[in-house]
Image (cartoon, rainbow, N blue to C red):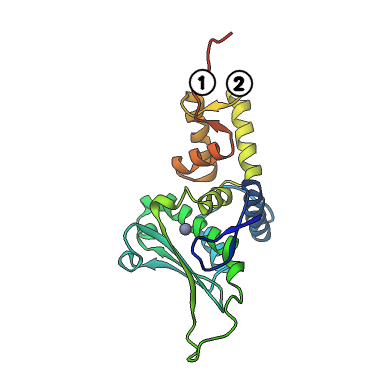
Amino acid sequence: MKWVKDRSGRFAKRPHYLPDELDAKCEATIDAFLKERYGAATFPISTDDLTILLEQNVDSLDLYAEPTDLGVDVEGVTDFYSSRKPTVKINKRLIEDSRFENRLRTTLTHELGHVLLHGFMFEGAVKSRSLFDVEEKAESNQCKRSAILTTSEGFACGAYLMPLAALTRAVQQFIHKSGFHGHQISLHTGAGTSLIDDVVTEFSVSRDAARVRLLQRGFLTEKPEIKGLF
Ligand SMILES: [Zn+2]
């Protein structure tokens, strides 16, 4: 982890995790949680378990937040406070409509990323309480659909749902099963599509989430397949 300038101006610096650090932290969280509950980490992690894991780390979790209270296109909100654990609100549309199951799973893990990766910055941040003891909200993160997968919390969300060791095993199984020969699987080939299919099934994620994660970790490449050069 390194410290970078905080663009919000609230802190002098904020932590910036490298991908390997994020992967290690996220994997440790999921491993510990699943082993504690079931004695072993198996995938996919259920949506109920994701909810329980998030609940364990926050002051309150509201799964039925009114979309109109959250703002246009906002799927989840994490609020940090000076004197208690954060609160998380999830747009109720995600839980009420089963077609949004994958979006619910990515939003839950995205907010978990906010809570576990940045929460420590707010612990005891404000030492003097105000005159009327009104609790101060230290920071609010409104997470829009477009940012759920692409931010650093988006990286974390992929790392919680598809921890690196388990993902690596899934890719190795795919290579073994498909007899793939080559340096790297191209996104734009049948093999690329089949690998995404396997990851979608194994980890119960959307095709988008699987593709982004496989590209980020270099298991897939955007480059076209090179054929017939030699
Ligand atoms: Zn966010």
Q: Position of residue 220 (x, y in %)?
A: 54, 32
Name the residue carrying label 1.
225
| Residue 94 drawn at (x, y percent) | 38, 57
Residue nearer the viewer, 78 or 134: 134
Q: Amino acid at mark 1?
A: Glu
User: How would you rate the neighbour count of disc 2 (Cα within 10 Å): few for under 14, some for 14-19, many for 20 or more?
Assistant: few
Count the labels in the image: 2
**Would you say the residues marked 2 and 1 are in contact, meaning their CB atoms lie under 8 Å apart?**
yes
Instruction: State whether residue 25 is above or below residue 195.
Output: below
Ligand 1 near label 1 (Cβ, under 8 Å)? Answer: no
Q: What kind of residue is marked 2?
A: Gly
Relative to 15, say whether 130 is above or below. below
Circle 1 Cα neighbour tier, 10 Å, few/some/many (<14 / 14–19 / ≥20): some
Q: Residue furthest top?
A: 230
Q: Is 69 located above or below residue 151 in the figure? A: below
Q: Nearer the viewer, residue 218 or 37?
A: 218
Mark 2 lies on a secondary structure that is loop
Instruction: Name the residue at 47% across, 86% down.
Output: 134
Q: Please provide percent x and percent y for residue 95.
A: 39, 59
Name the N-terminal-most of marks 2 and 1. Answer: 2
Q: CA distance from mark 2 to mark 1?
A: 9 Å
Which residue is more in the foreground, 165 or 223? 223
Secondary structure, mark 1, is loop
Which residue is tagged 2? 182
Residue 4 in percent (x, y) is at 59, 57
Position of the C terminus by quadrant: top right
